[in-house]
Each structure stands twice: as C-alpha cells, then as structure tokens.
Image (cartoon, rainbow, N blue to C red):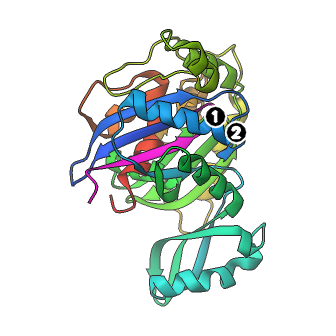
Amino acid sequence: MAATHVGVEITEESVRAVEVSAGRSPRVVAFGEVALPPDAAKDSEIIDEGAVAVALRQLWTTARIKGRSVTLGIASRRVLVREYSTAAMPPELLRKALPFQVQDLLPVPVSQAVLDYYPTSQQGEQLHGLLVAAVADTVEQLIAAFTRTKLRVQAVDLTAFGLARAGRVVAPQGTVAVIHVGDHTTQIVIMRDGIPEFVRILPADLETAAVRRRSLIASDESMTAPAAELAGSVVGSAGVLPRGALRGDVGGRPSADLIARLRSTLSFYLNRPGAAQIQQVLLTGAGAMVEGVQAGLNEHAGAPVRVIGLPEVIAMRESAPTGELALNLVSTLGLALGKDS
C-alpha cells in the first residue's frame, strides 16, 4: 500500500495538488498550486498539453510531493451527472450492463463516453444512485499530460464527490449542501448523512479569473523568467505560505447572478419528493471570497452558512495554507482522501 495519496485538479488558472498520509487518521504532508499560462486549459479540459506537463513537474518539485500516483478530479460542465435507478445487481454485472441501459440518456454515443455509477441507496430490488458520464476524449487528454511527467493517474473521479468527502469530515450527519465557488465553475453537492444525493455543476464566471491569475503570478518573485513564462508561480506548498494580494472585493462585480442560480438549484432540490430540509451550507472555493457571495447565501439559503478551508477539514503536518488557496484545496483534498474514506 502506498504511504501517501495525492489528489490533483487542473483548472483554467492553475494545477493544484494535496498529498495526505495513508491510514485511518490522514494528515496533509504537502500541498501546492502552480499557475498555468492563458489558454493552457479550460473547464477541466487541456488545450496545451506541454504547458500543463511543465506546471505539474514544477508543482511536484516546489511542493515536495513524494507520491507518483494520483487521483485526478474532473469538474467540466460537459460532465453529465443525474439521478438514475436500476435493478440491483453485483457491481461487476452493473458495470457491463450500464452502457446498454443509459445510452439513450447520453449527449454522445456510449462508445465515446466514460461512465461511473455512485450508488446512494437500495429499496427492495431497486438501486438508486448518481450516473456520471464524461467525454472519453476529455479524460484521455487529461491523462496524457501526466504521461509526460512520469506521474500515473490511478483514478479519475468527479471533483464533486471529492468535495462531498471533505464535507463529510466536517459535517457527517444531517442534510448538508457543500458549495465550491470557483473562478468559472460552481459545484454543488447535497448529501444526507455523508452520502451524496444531488450534484450540479454550474457555469458561474464571476470575472475574477484575471485577478486570480495576476495574484498567482505575483506570489513568487524569485522565479526565473523562463519558468514564469511557462508555468506561472507557486502560491503554496508545504511550509510555504502564499504571498501577494488575495481576492476580496474584485472591482465591485455583482454576484447576484450566482446567488440566483444557487438559490434556484437549492429550491429545485427541496421541491423533489422526499427531500429533507437543508440544515447547513458549507461554502468553499476562491469565489467564496468575492464580495456578496457569502452574504447572499446567508440571506437566501435558509440554513446557516459556514466557510471552510483546508485547515478546518484535516490536520496539517506543516504550516497551513491561507486565503484563496486554503479554500480551493478543499475539493483537491477530497480527491486524495479516496472513495473509501
């Protein structure tokens, strides 16, 4: 068994990773983030494979990450996540049957999709859960960037499921909404007693990406020029606190549209048959620092809102990250914790 587990996310602005020790009481042993040049990646899809590979190498070096096998998160808005019920059967039979059962539900031919199924409950002979379908080409492009770095992708996981694992550590009981507000994408997962029941991935560009990229690049003044051109700068690694400005009020941009979408999504969940009242909202992601986001949720969520960062979820062996990085790494941590956490 590996001594550590590593979770990785690739976003439009950066690549980030969290490494945790294996065992019943995991601790963060390394973490970091490296900025990507413009147009290297978008919405969990790689455009410039070489630039992403350079950033990954730099991340492993500067953050001193030891593990070479990773769980890679995917959070593209092109990923289909929907509730799906099927006849209860052994997992190996379900894997074989699923492509034939869901082919009419997919936006692409089943031969061009990667499928996963997350069981949530069973009633009699019916199994209920969440169907996940991603475009195979997108997943293959993500994995290809790692082959250039001598890193191995041992699993590809929906980032929202990682978010749920991290949220379960903080709030293992009750009905809880975990919301990660990113630069371009917002993920919502609602779980009951730690089990994800509902997932939505929303477009939510708060027009803060340029500010975030400037903050990332400005955070390491000592980087050599060629490295800065290729992969930006490190804004957090084990024992190194991020420097540079963090996002607060970004140009006074309104967040009303995002709050309206979140309110609509939460209302949709609550109007479903058998839905339980949401008892708590856990808010994370860099967008949580944008003026109006937390206040808007407090007003409209109908439940207490708590902002959580990496130190609120897990013990740290070294200095903890702060600011945006602490918020962004919550979902990355969940990927490292793995499906059996």
Q: Position of residue 256 (x, y in %)?
A: 70, 30
Say whether residue 169 is visible: yes
**Is 33 situated left or right of 316 in this image?**
right
Q: Where does the image place residue 129, in percent across and percent down from the top left? A: 53, 72
Q: Position of residue 74 (x, y in %)?
A: 58, 51
Say if mark 1 contacts mark 2, CB within 8 Å. Answer: yes
Circle 2: element type: loop
The residue that disc 2 covers is 48
Instruction: Decide which of 274, 70 is in the foreground and name it.
Output: 70
Q: Which residues are magenta?
A: 1-14
Q: Residue at x 39, y 48 (%)?
A: 68
Q: Secondary structure under badge 1?
A: helix
Q: Judge whether residue 167 can be spotted in this image.
A: no
| Disc 1 target residue | 51
Q: Residues within 10 Å of mark 1 (few under 14, many from 20)?
A: many
Kind of residue sitting beneath label 1: Ala
Give the left or right position of residue 299, taking residue 80 as reference: left
Does 92 appear in magenta?
A: no
